[in-house]
Image: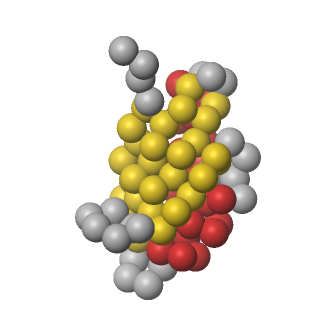
Amino acid sequence: MVQAYILIQTEVGKASFVAESIAQIAGVIQAEDVTGPYDVIVRAQADTVDELGRMVVAKVQQVEGITRTLTCPVVHL
């Protein structure tokens, strides 16, 4: 199982809509709107890195109101 944090910037006033929409996507553990340089932080999981990448590109980035994403895979050192 691969997990990642997805840091999301949105259009002004769209953070709540984006967080609610992303929370419905399969594989998303949590989606929260926050303050700071990013507007939404998501924790997601998938079976493989490739599957996680497909989720981000095909599902998360397609949500209306998103302007930029940064995916940070979780590592256990």
Q: Residue at x 72, y 59 (%)?
A: 24
Give above or below for 31 relative to 45: below
Residue 65 seen in render: no
Residue 4 seen in render: yes
> What percent of the width, then of the height, locates residue 11?
39, 77
User: Residue pushed farthest left?
Assistant: 37
> What percent of the width, then of the height, locates residue 75?
41, 23
Residue nearest the observer in this picture, 4 or 66: 4
Q: How is the image coloured?
A: secondary structure
Give above or below for 19 relative to 27: below
Residue nearest the observer in this picture, 75 or 24: 75
The picture quadrant where one finds residue 9 is bottom left
User: Residue pushed farthest bottom?
Assistant: 13
Give above or below for 74 relative to 18: above
Q: Residue at x 34, y 70 (%)?
A: 35
Q: Residue at x 61, y 35 (%)?
A: 45
Q: Residue at x 54, y 32 (%)?
A: 3
> What percent of the width, then of the height, locates residue 14?
48, 79
Image quarter of the N terminus: top right
User: Residue pushed farthest top?
Assistant: 77
The picture quadrant where one finds residue 72 is top left
